[in-house]
């Protein structure tokens, strides 16, 4: 039976507060879009007309509302699991099977994962085949969508099962030091996935082949050489089989690092624009942003592992949610649920760090390319092709945006060239 105490009251207050502020930020962003979303910013007047701007506004608002609804549903499901008595019933059911600790823990976590999957499927269907289709992005067939779902589930079960099973085994076998070994395992696992992703995981979903444009490939290799960065290869990806969204990225570490260009990007951008986008990505690499982000994540995860170790045997936590005995894998689930609303308030910190990295990468792109002109043109085209919101609310930007908003970002880029007033 759920016990009402200070922990439960505190959790509900923090949970509802985070949910309310998340809803409020989305509402403010939508209202800001409605108010200002009918005016083309001066810097975009050569790229975006009134009809395109109207589509941007409609797409941004519809996507925001849909994502907000999905988050509300997730919140409701979590509260039902925690407060309805389902959690103690399910924990007791697992115990009745009389399995070993690791298998019991894996089976226990499979329950919420299955519920989450069942709920996610209709949202994925609607987002992909209604919203994305409506605005001309989705090109994926139902059969390919289903194949992707099956592959994602299989990968999640295999990788998640191995990682979680290893954690549980450590908890059972190293009673006082499992948190440290678990953290080391988590860190090593992240590095392994980064290394393996371009070789094993990514090719399961897309076809990768060397860039067909030999002239562009040569220019890319020369640009990489100027930066002193050696790469495994330059590839183009058949992103157009699923979506018309455009992008480019670095992936892998060590011998597996490579450049990946969406075929949709290659089709809609000039060579100079593609190179400027890649120069920006090179900036991330040269400024060691990936390494810095990993260090931040590992420091944060170390704190979480040790905090879990300190609280995993706290009787009040179990009794609060109706569980009559201390079951470590149930404790992990409860602690993750308790931390979810708290983590919301750390979002601006991580967003701010990410935006600072983006500015550094923009500066590096300018140094490597000699000008920001091509990157500015690329950002304009990306905004148009992806129907990016040109009028986000400043508070929403501060809280969520991992990149500077496009209008202010382009203004800063032009300042780097000393062309603050030149509309190029």
Image (tube, rainbow, N blue to C red):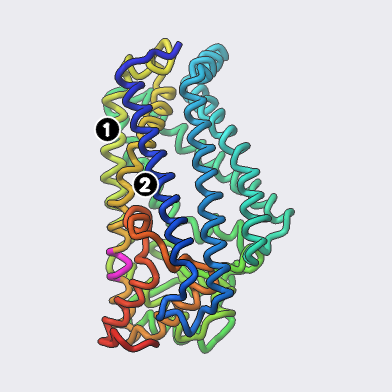
Residue 16 visible in the current orientation: yes
Q: Nearer the viewer, residue 168 or 247?
A: 247
Q: Give the numbered dot on residue 206.
A: none
Q: Nearer the viewer, residue 200 or 148?
A: 148
| Left or right of 94 on screen, residue 135 | right
Q: How far across and down, in percent of the image, does residue 379 sit?
A: 44, 76
Q: Secondary structure at mark 1?
A: helix
Q: Give the numbered dot on residue 188.
A: 2
- Queried whether the magenta region covers residue 357, the answer comes back as yes
Residue at coordinates 52% horizontally, 72% vertically from top-left?
Answer: 261
Q: Residues within 10 Å of mark 1 (few under 14, many from 20)?
A: some
| 227 vs 21: above or below | below
The first of marks 1 and 2 along the sequence is 2
Q: Residues within 10 Å of mark 2 (few under 14, many from 20)?
A: few
Residue assigned mark 1: 306
Q: Main SS of the magenta segment?
A: helix
Q: How far across and down, in percent of the image, does residue 173 sit?
A: 36, 24
Q: How far across and down, in percent of the image, does residue 40 sit?
A: 46, 75
């Amino acid at each position: 039976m759920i016990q009402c105490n200070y922990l439960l009251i505190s959790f509900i207050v923090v949970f509802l507060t985070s949910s309310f502020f998340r809803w409020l930020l989305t509402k403010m962003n939508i209202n800001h879009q409605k108010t200002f979303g009918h005016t083309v910013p001066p810097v975009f007047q050569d790229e975006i007309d009134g009809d395109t701007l109207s589509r941007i506004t409609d797409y941004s608002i519809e996507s925001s509302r849909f994502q907000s609804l999905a988050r509300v549903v997730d919140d409701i499901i979590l509260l039902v699991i925690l407060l309805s008595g389902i959690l103690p019933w399910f924990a007791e059911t697992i115990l009745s099977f009389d399995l070993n600790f690791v298998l019991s823990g894996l089976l226990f976590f499979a329950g919420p994962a299955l519920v989450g999957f069942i709920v996610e499927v209709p949202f994925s269907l609607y987002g992909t085949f209604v919203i994305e289709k409506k605005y001309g992005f989705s090109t994926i067939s139902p059969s390919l969508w289903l194949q992707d779902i099956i592959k994602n589930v299989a990968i999640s079960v295999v990788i998640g099962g191995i990682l979680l099973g290893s954690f549980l085994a450590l908890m059972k076998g190293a009673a006082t030091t499992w948190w440290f070994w678990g953290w080391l395992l988590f860190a090593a696992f992240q590095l392994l996935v980064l290394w393996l992703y371009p070789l094993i995981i990514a090719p399961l979903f897309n076809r990768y082949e060397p860039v067909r444009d030999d002239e562009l490939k040569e220019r890319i290799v020369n640009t990489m050489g100027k930066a002193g960065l050696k790469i495994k290869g330059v590839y183009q990806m058949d992103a157009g089989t699923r979506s018309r969204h455009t992008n480019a990225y670095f992936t892998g570490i060590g011998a597996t690092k490579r450049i990946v260009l969406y075929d949709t990007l290659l089709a809609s951008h000039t060579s100079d624009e593609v190179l400027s986008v890649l120069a920006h990505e090179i900036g991330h690499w040269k400024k060691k942003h990936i390494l810095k982000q990993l260090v931040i994540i590992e420091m944060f995860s170390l704190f979480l592992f040790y905090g879990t170790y300190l609280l995993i045997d706290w009787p009040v936590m179990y009794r609060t949610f109706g569980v009559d005995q201390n079951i470590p894998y149930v404790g992990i689930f409860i602690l993750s649920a308790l931390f979810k609303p708290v983590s919301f308030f750390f979002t601006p910190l991580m967003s701010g760090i990410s935006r600072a990295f983006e500015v550094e990468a923009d500066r590096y792109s300018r140094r490597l390319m000699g000008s920001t002109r091509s990157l500015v043109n690329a950002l304009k085209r990306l905004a148009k092709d992806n129907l990016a919101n040109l009028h986000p609310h400043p508070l929403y930007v501060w809280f969520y945006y991992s990149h500077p908003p496009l209008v202010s970002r382009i203004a800063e880029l032009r300042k780097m060239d000393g062309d603050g007033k030149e509309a190029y």
